[in-house]
Amino acid sequence: MKTTIKIIIVFFCMSLSMMAQKDKKGKGKEKVDETIYTAVDQKAAFTEGESALQNYIKKNTAIPASLKEGSTINRPVKLTIDENGKVTDAIIDGSASACADCDKEAVKVSKTLIGFTPAKLKGKNVKSYLVVNVDFFKEVKEDPDASTSRKKKMVWD
């Protein structure tokens, strides 16, 4: 009786270990590293350089109507760059600003970025964070009637 129970337990344990190591096709599962590194040997970078990155952001960022005239807002956006250099996530880094539409636009334009060199740790490409700044500036519109020359109003009786 004891021998039969031992044999059943051994076969049960073996079958569990075999099922845990194989997927539906019978192949062993590959371990995926989901760690996002903050300290790396070489940080992720925009392939074309920092000035090209800022030019792309400036060109593709829409200034929200809710931004007050004469206002300047800088929004740091924390990007997650994967092992292949693709942006997988973008969130505002820090507290929300007075312009919620600016925050939404900063995240939106950041998610469209492509062409990053991934971060490296011990010679291997890894997921990492990269913070980029998105600037918003809304110029003051000048009133066309407020020119330097005075206009006379004619009053008709």
Image: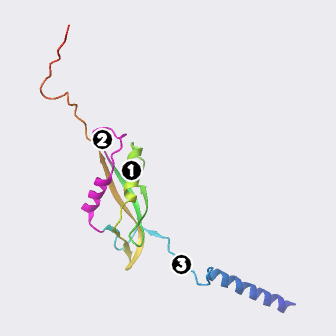
Amino acid at dot 3 = Lys
Question: What secondary structure is found at the residue carrying circle 2?
Answer: loop
Circle on res. 36 = none
User: Looking at the image, which residue sits at the far top?
Assistant: 157
Q: Tell me which label, 3 or 1, sits earlier in the chain.
A: 3
In front: label 3 or label 1: 1
Residue 151 horizontal side relative to residue 128, left or right: left
24 sits left or right of 123 in the view: right
Q: Quadrant of residue 140?
A: top left
Question: How many discs appear?
Answer: 3
Q: Which mark is residue 31?
A: 3
Q: Residues within 10 Å of mark 2 (few under 14, many from 20)?
A: few
The part of the chain drawn in magenta is: 47-73
Residue 110 appears at what percent x and percent y?
37, 57
Observer-side mark, 1 or 2, equals 1
Helix or strand or loop: what does disc 3 sit on? loop
Mark 2 lies on residue: 71
Of 117 and 8, nearer the camera is: 117
Q: Quarter of the image for the N terminus: give it.
A: bottom right
Q: Along the polypeptide, which appears first: circle 2 or circle 3?
A: 3
**Quarter of the view holding residue 90:** bottom left
Residue matched to label 1: 105
Q: Is residue 2 above or below residue 61?
A: below
At 17% from the left and 15% from the top, the residue drawn is: 154
Q: Residue at x 34, y 67 (%)?
A: 115
**Amino acid carrying mark 2 in the image:** Ser
- Give residue 91's quadrant in the image: bottom left
Picture residue at 31% right of the left edge, 56% below the top: 57
Query: Tags 2 and 3 in contact by the CB under 8 Å rule?
Result: no
Residue reaching furthest to the right: 1
